[in-house]
Each structure stands twice: as structure tokens, then as C-alpha cells.
Image (spheres, helix red, strand yellow):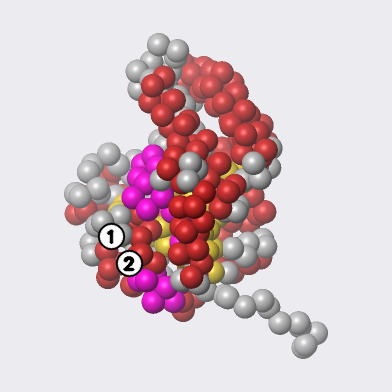
């Protein structure tokens, strides 16, 4: 396995400085934001697709630092009920896939998106309850009329260009847990897999090791991010929490850099589970810890993961 970082963390710094820094920390990979919510500070697909010389120089700069690009990230909501919003995210998605093909990046990381509750809706509507019955009806309509038709076509587009789609399972979108990820994969095909981010699953009460084993070869990319569960707040209000992320003292859970939400044994178990299912790609650090600075949070994550990561192939069992 290789260690990488989602470089949107350093969006206020020029790419050459970011590459210097990441390489000096001993990492082997970067994940680039290519538009949508991650922004495009270091990767502008529409520009690079039109300039072959600039694209060649861009790729060479990354290679010269001994780095690979693990994925291009274009997280957005192409299922948004506002057609203009959806069209913009769809354009970003397609440009990202085309750029990934040209850069020989095998994976695009993204969200599934979420439709509204009808064709006349203005905002997305995430269904979290089977009753009253209109919720079940709405969910059926979303999947059959919006989710599956869109991703069947968009998935074929990615497959035709040799790119796999790694969906981040994230509450607020139709794919938010292993079951919904595999539901979409079954409907669309193996072009769809998971960008496994345990931080979004921890707070839902999902066991990381069990879910990794359940997803198996459907895991195409991995985000290394942690979540701290505040048991006292959880005991009072559960895990569905809409308080601002900045209200740390009163929230039931908070994103943390790896090691500050779960201990070393938990992360060693995650790494072992990934190896067990055959995942041998990149762990991409995503730092969204409100209690740590950019550089300290990133540095702590690098140090922690270097100590738990298995980077070499296992030896033959000489004892058996």
C-alpha cells in the first residue's frame, strides 16, 4: 500500500510548493481536486484538456517528485433537482473522467448525489426513514427515475474511457453505506466501487472491519480520516447531528485526524482488513480536523499511518 494525501488541504499554496512538501514528508501519492466541492486549485480539467503541452508539463512535474496521482476528485451532486446546478456538476464530472483518462489515473472519486422529492423540487431530499409511507414512495421514485438512469449512462461514459468510479459513502446522498453502494453497483456494473472513508461510517455505527470485508474487491480508493464520538452527547441526542461542525463541545461526533478518534489497534485492524480483501493501492489522507492546524494535523496523520501501514508484500509462509 502507498500513502497519499488529498491536496485540497493545501489549496492556498501553489502546486510546486505542495509537491515539494508532500514528497519531503515521504508520501508516494496525491489526490487532486478537479472541481465541485473539492475545488480545482491545483487541477483545472477544462484548461488541461485543451493544452497538451501544459498537460505534459503538469504530469512531468508530479512524476519528477516521485509521486503518482491516486485519483481525481470531483465530488458534487449531478442529481440535484435544480437543472442548472446538476448540469454544472455533470460537466465537471465528464471533464474529470476525460482528464483521468489522459493522465492514466485509474480512479475518479465522487459522491452519488441526491435528487429532490419530485420533478418540481428545488432542493435535494435525503430519505432516512421508511415511514410515513410517502418516504418509501419517494425513495423508490428517486432510485428508479433519477439515480439508476443517470448513473447507468454516466457509468458507461466512465467505463468507455477506462476509468473506475469510487463513490464516497456519505450521509445526505443516496449512497451512504455499504448496502446502498452495492445496490448502485448491482444496477450499473463494476465500473462503480467505493472510495472507502471510515470517518463517514464510524458515526453511523458501522463497523469498519466488517464493512471492508463485506465490500471486498468493490473498494477502489481509500480516504484516511477519523471521527471522534462524544459518548456523553451521543447518549443524550444520538448520532443524527445538525449542529455546526464548529460547535465541537455539543456535537455527538467530530471529524478528527487519524488516531484522534480511534486507537492504533483499530487502524491496524482496518489496514489488515484491506489487505485481506486484496486492496493494495493508496491510503489518501483527508484532513478535516477542526482541532488541528493544517500542517500539524497532516503531520500527525503521516506519522501515525506510517507506523500502521503495511507497505511490502507478505512473505511466503515458511513456517507452514
On-image quarter of the N terminus: bottom right
Q: Quadrant of the C terminus?
A: bottom right
Image quarter for residue 82?
Answer: top left
Residue 107 position, x and y percent, is 57, 50
Let me know if residue 111 is in the magenta part.
no
Kindly identify which numbered label has been placed on residue 13: 1
What range of the chain is rendered magenta?
Answer: 20-43
Q: Nearer the viewer, residue 298 or 105?
A: 105
Against 32, is 116 above or below?
above
Residue 32, image x and y in percent?
A: 43, 54
At 59% from the left edge and 47% from the top edge, which residue is drawn? Answer: 101
Position above or below: 119 against 207: above
Q: Is residue 118 left or right of residue 141?
A: left
The secondary structure type at the circle numbered 1 is loop
Q: Which structural element holds mark 2?
A: helix
Residues at marks 2 and 1 touching, judged by CB atoms closer than 8 Å: yes
Amino acid at each position: 500500500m502507498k500513502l497519499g494525501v488529498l491536496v485540497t488541504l493545501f489549496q492556498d499554496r501553489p502546486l510546486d510548493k505542495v509537491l515539494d512538501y508532500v514528497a519531503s514528508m515521504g508520501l508516494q501519492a496525491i489526490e487532486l481536486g478537479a472541481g465541485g466541492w473539492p475545488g480545482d486549485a491545483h487541477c483545472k480539467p477544462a484548461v488541461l484538456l485543451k493544452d497538451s503541452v501544459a498537460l505534459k508539463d503538469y504530469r512531468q512535474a508530479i512524476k519528477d517528485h516521485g509521486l503518482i496521482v491516486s485519483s481525481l476528485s470531483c465530488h458534487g451532486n449531478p442529481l440535484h433537482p435544480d437543472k442548472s446546478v446538476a448540469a454544472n456538476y455533470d460537466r465537471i464530472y465528464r471533464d474529470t473522467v476525460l482528464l483521468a483518462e489522459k493522465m492514466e489515473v485509474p480512479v475518479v472519486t465522487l459522491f452519488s448525489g441526491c435528487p429532490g422529492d419530485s420533478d418540481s423540487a428545488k432542493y435535494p431530499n435525503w430519505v432516512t426513514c421508511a415511514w410515513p409511507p410517502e418516504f418509501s414512495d419517494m425513495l423508490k421514485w428517486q432510485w428508479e427515475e433519477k439515480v439508476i438512469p443517470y448513473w447507468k449512462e454516466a457509468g458507461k461514459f466512465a467505463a468507455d474511457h477506462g476509468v473506475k468510479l469510487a463513490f464516497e459513502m456519505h450521509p445526505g446522498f443516496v449512497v451512504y453505506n455499504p448496502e446502498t453502494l452495492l445496490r448502485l453497483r448491482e444496477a450499473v456494473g463494476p465500473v462503480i466501487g467505493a472510495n472507502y472513508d471510515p470517518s463517514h461510517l464510524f458515526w453511523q455505527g458501522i463497523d469498519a472491519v466488517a464493512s471492508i470485508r463485506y465490500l471486498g474487491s468493490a473498494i477502489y480508493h481509500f480516504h484516511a480520516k477519523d471521527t471522534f464520538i462524544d459518548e456523553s452527547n451521543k447518549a443524550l441526542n444520538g448520532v443524527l447531528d445538525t449542529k455546526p461542525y464548529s460547535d465541537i463541545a455539543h456535537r455527538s461526533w467530530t471529524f478528527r485526524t487519524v488516531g484522534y478518534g480511534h486507537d492504533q489497534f483499530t487502524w491496524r485492524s482496518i489496514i489488515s482488513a484491506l489487505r485481506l480483501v486484496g486492496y493494495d493501492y493508496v491510503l489518501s489522507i483527508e484532513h478535516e480536523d477542526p482541532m488541528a492546524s493544517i500542517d500539524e494535523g497532516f503531520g500527525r496523520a503521516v506519522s501515525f499511518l506510517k507506523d500502521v501501514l503495511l507497505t511490502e508484500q507478505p512473505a511466503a509462509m515458511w513456517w507452514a
